[in-house]
Amino acid sequence: MVGPKTQLLPLLLLLLFLSALSFFSYHHSSLLISVSNPNPNPKPSLNLTLHPQIPNFTFIIKVLAYNRLDSLSRCLRSLAAADYLSDPVHLHLHIDHFPLSDAADADRKLQESRRILDLVDGFEWKFGDKVVHYRTRNAGLQAQWLEAWWPSSDHEFAFVVEDDLEVSPLYYKFLKNLIVNYYYNASNSRPYIYGASLQRPRFVPGKHGNKLQLDDGTRLFLYQLVGTWGQLLFPKPWKEFRLWYDKHKAKGIKPILNGMVTTGWYKKMGEKIWTPWFIKFIHTRGYFNIYTNFLHERALSASHRDAGVNYGKTAGPDSHILDESSLDLKFWDMQPLSDLKWYDFCFREIFPERVVVSLDELGSTLDSVQKHNTVIVVSLFGAKEMVIRNLLCHLETLNLLNYVLIGPESELLFDLARRGHPVITTNRFLESVGAHKLISMKHSHVHTINEILVKVYVLQKCLQSGYSSWVVDGNMLPVSSDAFVESDHSYDIYIGKTSELFFASGLSSTRKVWDDDFISKFAMMVNSFLVKRQSISFGYVMAEILEQKKGVRVKNLDETSFGVRIDNSRVNQSLGDGKQVAFWSHDMASDLVQQRLQELGVWTVDDDFSCKAVICHQS
Ligand SMILES: *[C@@H]1O[C@H](CO)[C@@H](O)[C@H](O)[C@H]1NC(C)=O
Ligand SMILES: *[C@@H]1O[C@H](CO)[C@@H](O)[C@H](O)[C@H]1NC(C)=O
Ligand SMILES: *[C@@H]1O[C@H](CO)[C@@H](O)[C@H](O)[C@H]1NC(C)=O
Ligand SMILES: *[C@@H]1O[C@H](CO)[C@@H](O)[C@H](O)[C@H]1NC(C)=O
């Protein structure tokens, strides 16, 4: 039995060699743009062939039609005129039925439906399968969209077009290029991108949001809003949405998101439309859509805004359709995701995935978040997820954006980072600055020690950068935008009496006590407490050290003078009137915290732990 074994080895080597080769060619030839021709109107040749390991790539066009014959005819003509490379592309037509309530008009409506069916029957689709789904009753736009698709694999994509749409002949090549680059390139894709909209972006749904303005160099960007005029949907997020919708619908939970124009639509139109559901889902998950910015009112799809559910009378095309004649080389350019800008429902730019793991990154992050030279350092150690999410909603509402979050590495922390909150991952950060060497004792309070150490490093960096800093824990909730404003300049440092509240002014008098070996002295103090088995906290260690320093003005702060302490019994105070924070003890149960904060009217998350409202601030 020697023979088969010896033959196996060369075969294995060959397989390894082949897979290395195919990996190589995948990364080097899946997108080829010939740029050798320098003439001003170059015809780039794209290689949009997917890697052989993705055999099941499927693209389905979902046309949602009703009774607009001319619109549908124009739509189908434009779809058939597009370049589909040599890919099979399927066409699914979903034709809604007229409502059966009005028998008087039935003959005319039956005739109208016949003409629509004759049109689709006679329409030749040579790129793949044509499937017609003719309904027996009126479904409306919501069901038309939601029932149009259940992806049969993670390689199936749907492009949804309503019948008054017209697409560019280039639209498919563009979308395929986008799928190759932002879905199938693992280093350049994100599970929180749900698709791409080809319509020209114009609408900002957050009330009092920023104007939708982009610079001329921006070709692609990310934006939370769904587009209904030519939307490509990625399979996984769409499935998630359908399950989320089912759950909320079944439990009678409405897609109310305060502060959004679309919630007004929902209140008026109810279940006739689907977008308020999708928007609420996207807000909860923090997902994004890819958009184009082709300038001069151009886009790859245009809505003719024909009279129907959305328009009482025909409003005409919203954009100019882009064709070959208006192309330049940059058209096919799919920049790395990290170079693109991201915008929320207020059209505020956000910066996903700011995860600080080193001192240098810390410096630039502090520079980018500081406001009036002040930074709020929020420690999430020991705080429960719903309490943290509630806190972040408040910071957003109060427009307090000059914070960094510190916490143990966790899925939650990374989720917060990808939603745009700057985070410092404690362990990796402390490793990178070599902090573990400073603590000599073996100890059981790893989290406590790490928390104290990361606070002192961040504080030092703030002061070195000339910033005043607040250090607070997740068990303190600001309810006024003045909560973290230094009000009394006669002190350099405040230390909270009962909470972990700490403030250091960025003035030079504070920095003076912060000499080069401050951190090593701080660590020695921590070590000595550990030896004596004393319980320690950041504020306690700081207070001990500062006691030995001369010339620094320290004040012990009584939190109840500006805040409301909550505990197990019902709150008999109210916030406001100079009460700018609510605070509680670390060991209070989180459902009780929630109950108390609800009583105070400062619980702002829903059952999905998502902010109940979008509050835009002009920026
Ligand atoms: C994948 O995306 C990265 C950018 O994140 C890029 O550098 C790389 O060339 C892309 N790979 C392919 C095969 O296009
Ligand atoms: C295009 O890319 C595919 C897959 O990477 C490869 O198999 C094919 O040979 C390429 N075609 C050209 C013309 O480069
Ligand atoms: C592709 O589809 C075939 C048949 O539907 C299935 O057997 C196969 O597992 C699929 N391959 C992948 C990579 O999904
Ligand atoms: C609120 O309750 C505390 C005890 O829980 C009590 O000491 C205090 O007097 C009460 N304040 C008011 C305004 O009733």
Image (cartoon, helix red, strand yellow):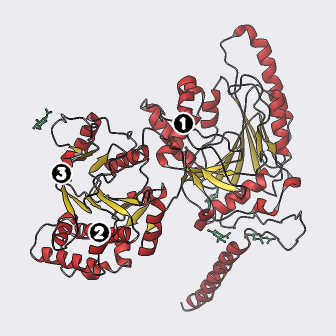
Q: Earlier in the sequence, mark 1 or mark 2?
A: 1
SS of the residue at dot 2? helix
Q: Nearer the viewer, mark 1 or mark 2?
A: 2
Residue that label 3 marks: 558
Q: From the viewer's perspective, is residue 252 above or below residue 585?
A: above
Q: Which residue is mark 2?
A: 510
Depth check: 493 or 538 in front? 493
- The amino acid pointed to by label 2 is Thr
Answer left or right for 585 relative to 168: left
Which is more N-terminal, label 1 or label 3? 1
Ligand 4 contact, mark 2 (Cβ < 8 Å): no
Q: Disc 3, disc 2: CB below 8 Å?
A: no
Res 214 seen here: yes
Q: Which residue is mark 1?
A: 207
Q: Is residue 506 above or below residue 609?
A: below
The residues tagged by marks 3 and 2 sit, at their Cα atoms, a distance apart of 21 Å
Q: Position of residue 37 (x, y in %)?
A: 88, 71
Of the two numbered discs 3 and 2 in the rendering, the one whose residue sits closer to the viewer: 2
Whole-percent x and y of residue 239?
55, 46
Considering every residue shown, the one lying at the far top of the view is 104
Q: Is residue 154 left or right of residue 79?
A: left
